[in-house]
Image (cartoon, coloured by chain):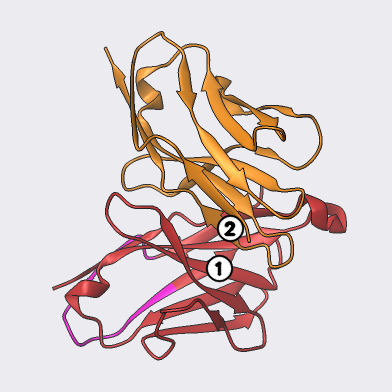
Chain colours: A red, B orange
Amino acid sequence: GAVVSQHPSRVICKSGTSVKIECRSLDFQATTMFWYRQFPKQSLMLMATSNEGSKATYEQGVEKDKFLINHASLTLSTLTVTSAHPEDSSFYICSATISPLGDVSNTEAFFGQGTRLTVV
Amino acid sequence: AQSVTQLDSHVSVSEGTPVLLRCNYSSSYSPSLFWYVQHPNKGLQLLLKYTSAATLVKGINGFEAEFKKSETSFHLTKPSAHMSDAAEYFCVVSDPGTYKYIFGTGTRLKVLA
């Protein structure tokens, strides 16, 4: 299957600093990627849809100035947590969708390995 | 709007006994449904998916799920649990227009020796 690589897998940063997380589709082009956040022992919540070459679409309640998303190429989306605070500590996961042979009814998402962010 | 409900937050089974993880969905369209597994501090692994083909879907590691439109269910089963099956399982429905994935709240499977 398609591979989505997320980096770093773990990061610890000081409160007030910014952290960038990368999400790459290694063997396919992804016009759309998604960013999720997972609190401990909870489900994944969609934060935003990252669109190549245009602005990201944020879900209700997600601060776009706090979570900056850049989708500069068809294989890379980045999430920057700006001025991080301890409450931003979480597991962040990206995904990219692919439609084999252009069959949109068979679209499938492939997930990165996740990034565990700890803000101290 | 699409949604999924996982009926059990925790399930415990003995090794070698059957596993049943329940999921009900709500969808205005013919849904695409998925089951993912997540081991502690790991990413998500796709177990199986339903995309309007056969209603009984076979996945990896001996898991399977049956799509029942009349019951709006997509329960995950395995005939015999293994210790390595202990993990968090998510039922997911895909929005056909945006391809957003809507996750259930998850079911934590515990396998007892």
2 and 1 marks on the same chain: no
Q: Residue at x 72, y 58 (%)?
A: A98
Three-letter residue code for mark 2: Tyr
Q: Quadrant of residue B54?
A: top right
Closest to the observer: B8 or A67? B8
| Quadrant position of the C terminus of chain B in the picture | top left
Residue A16 placed where, x, y %? Answer: 19, 87
Closest to the observer: A69 or B89? B89
Residue A69 placed where, x, y %? Answer: 49, 82
- Residue A34: give its label: 1
Give the structural element (helix, strand or loop) at label 1. Answer: strand
Closest to the observer: A95 or B106? B106
Q: Is residue B44 shown above or below B107? A: below
Q: How dense is the environment of label 2, judged by Cα within 10 Å: few (below 14), some, or many (20 and up)?
A: many
| Residue A84 can be seen, yes or no | yes
| Residue A3 can be seen, yes or no | no
Residue B3 placed where, x, y %? Answer: 56, 53
- Residue B106: give its label: none
Residue highlighted by disc 2: B101
Q: Chain of mark 1?
A: A
Q: Residue at x 48, y 48 (%)?
A: B104
Magenta-tinted stretch: A8-21
